[in-house]
Amino acid sequence: MIRMRKILFRRANQVILDVFILIFSWIGGYLLRFEGLPSGQYSHYIGQMAIMLPLLVLGRLILFYAFSVYKIIWRYVSIRDVFVIFKAVLPPTAVLVALRFFTPFSLASLRVPISVIAIEFLLVMLGTSGARMFRRMTLELRDREELNGRNGGPEKRVLLVGAGDAGNIILKELEQRVDFGARVVGFVDDDPEKKGKNIQGVRVLGDTSKIPEIAKAYSVNEAIITIANASSKDIRRIVEICESAGLKVKIVPGLFEMLDEKVKITKVREVNISDLLGRSVFHLEKHLPEVSRAYRDKRILVTGAGGSIGSELCRQLATMEPREIVLLDKDENSIFEIDNDLKEVGVNGVRVYPVIANIKNDDRLRLLFDKYKPEIVFHAAAHKHVPLMEQNVTEAVLNNVLGTKNVVEVASAFGVERFTFISTDKAVNPTSVMGATKKLGEVIVQGVARASGTKFSCVRFGNVLGSRGSAVPLFQKQIAKGGPVTVTHPEVRRYFMSISEAVHLIIQAGTLGEKGEIFVLDMGQPIRIVDMVKTLIRLSGHKEDDIEIRYIGMRPGEKLYEEILINEELTRATSFEKIYIAPPVDSLNGYAIPVVDNIIETARAGDVEKIINSLLGIGIGFQRNAE
């Protein structure tokens, strides 16, 4: 009851204020037009002004209620709300204009001078919207002062790096969210045309090279990189400049993290290793509608849905409005997590089915395909840990080869429209058992694709940053303990990409396959692992010399350099940037399935030595201990 009284009192005050503004605007229109009260030959306008005043004020108030102007919360008034006020103000002005031009001279009291109409309209707009804007500004100023008082000190002074769309949104949110205790002092941007320009009253102070002097001149505490499409190279450069100026650095999420979401200040986070090594410039909006159409209203099954790649596949596919997604994995905990993740974020009415199953069981797969009838399959399930698979050769073959064979053959038998096999750069001239099994997976896909109505494809790429079982979490644990950080060799290099970008490219490539083509993702330049470790050390707040880096030697199956392509695979561009196609090769002289069956039977018998000898002799480029 008390709250209702407060609302009514507040609304009454708003109405009273608007009445004063409307009266002042109407009378002010005449005073400005006639430079005082109309007199002499214009004295008849005094009567007109008095007669029409109550009618106009009443009409405007009725329209303010009709257009819900009094439901606008003044604290959060925006340009959109000003447009609502404009729509409420316009009709009476239009009526006055119509009366001025279409009323006969005999009704002169209704013919208001055009200049008076125009001035009154401008004064009403300025008065009503200005009062609301002024109230918002005073409330925000009061909140800032109260916040500073509670915190016992001044608010953070923030510099935004990037004066584009993301920077504009972050600035707006920071101005509204005084609870963050931050004030934007300016922008920096490398576009020379933006220098000196103002965005929401905040000036572009210079380019990124000027960050140290700007930080000193404006007492900046923190920088936020507001370039959603920045490359890792640019981010590294900006971070180094900011660190040299003693600034704490944060960053907005990359495009692949956001997809169709808007940048929000609540999503601004610390710079991480994926930002420094895994981002690339990519025009996401260019192909997103086309790709989304390919998956809209489809039944999709993802194997390995609980893994790093599989779970991100499910998240991104869910934004493309498929009819349903089947989450298939043998690990119940990971399926529980991704199922809950999808429920928490909401999936636009997409039906999600969590399924616990092992791809080595083809009878179970047939029952599942018969029940859910998937139209699109992404096969991400695999054992991927290189050293671990060297110690578990038979399991590597049974899971990565038998499991893939089962999923491929069942998908083909049940008439799946499209099938995408997730491969790896380690399948090129493999030196590890894991790489060899993934190469056999490509062979299986190409062998079945020749005679199948299903459109098959393979997608080959390198390491993804932050994936489960990758080296990055291990390095971070070692750094947290104070070292040493163990690296196999000072010159070992790997290709890296963020999980979100890799997955989006996989989804794109999944729309292209026909007969088992191998699609290769452009992962940029390979990165020295020791350089990545040094970056992690700096991100952890240490100096490079604070943590020991210890070289322990190459492990079984590892290479100094990973390859993406082999010589006979002459790549050509596709319709998607960063995706290249290598035509299918005639692997195993056309006897792919019999040879694969042979190796599977050897694995079932547990004969590791015979498996290795078979892999060495079947012509897939497998070698031992190559560097």
Image: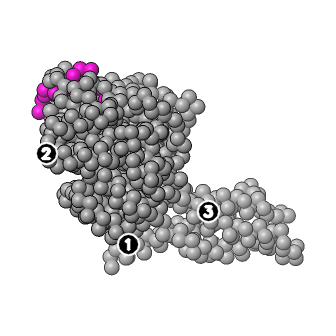
**489 in magenta:** yes
User: Which residue is the site of mark 1?
Assistant: 6
Residue at 26% from the left image edge and 60% from the top image edge: 362
Residue at 70% from the left image edge and 58% from the top image edge: 119
Circle 3/circle 1 CB separation < 8 Å: no
User: Which residue is the site of mark 2?
Assistant: 606
CA–CA distance between discs 2 and 3? 79 Å
* Dominant secondary structure, magenta: loop
Q: Where, quadrant-wise, is the C terminus in this rendering?
A: top left
Identify which amino acid the numbered label 3 is placed on.
Phe
Pointer 2 or 3: first along the chain: 3
Choose top left, top right, bottom left or bottom right for residue 99.
bottom right
Instruction: Point out the stretch of residues depicted in magenta.
Output: 481-494
The spot of residue 91 in percent (x, y) is 68, 69
The spot of residue 615 in percent (x, y) is 25, 36
Model colouring = one colour
CA–CA distance between discs 3 and 1? 27 Å
Disc 1 packing (10 Å; few <14; some 14–19; many ≥20): few
User: Which residue is the site of mark 3?
Assistant: 86
Name the mark nearer the viewer: 2 or 1.
Answer: 2
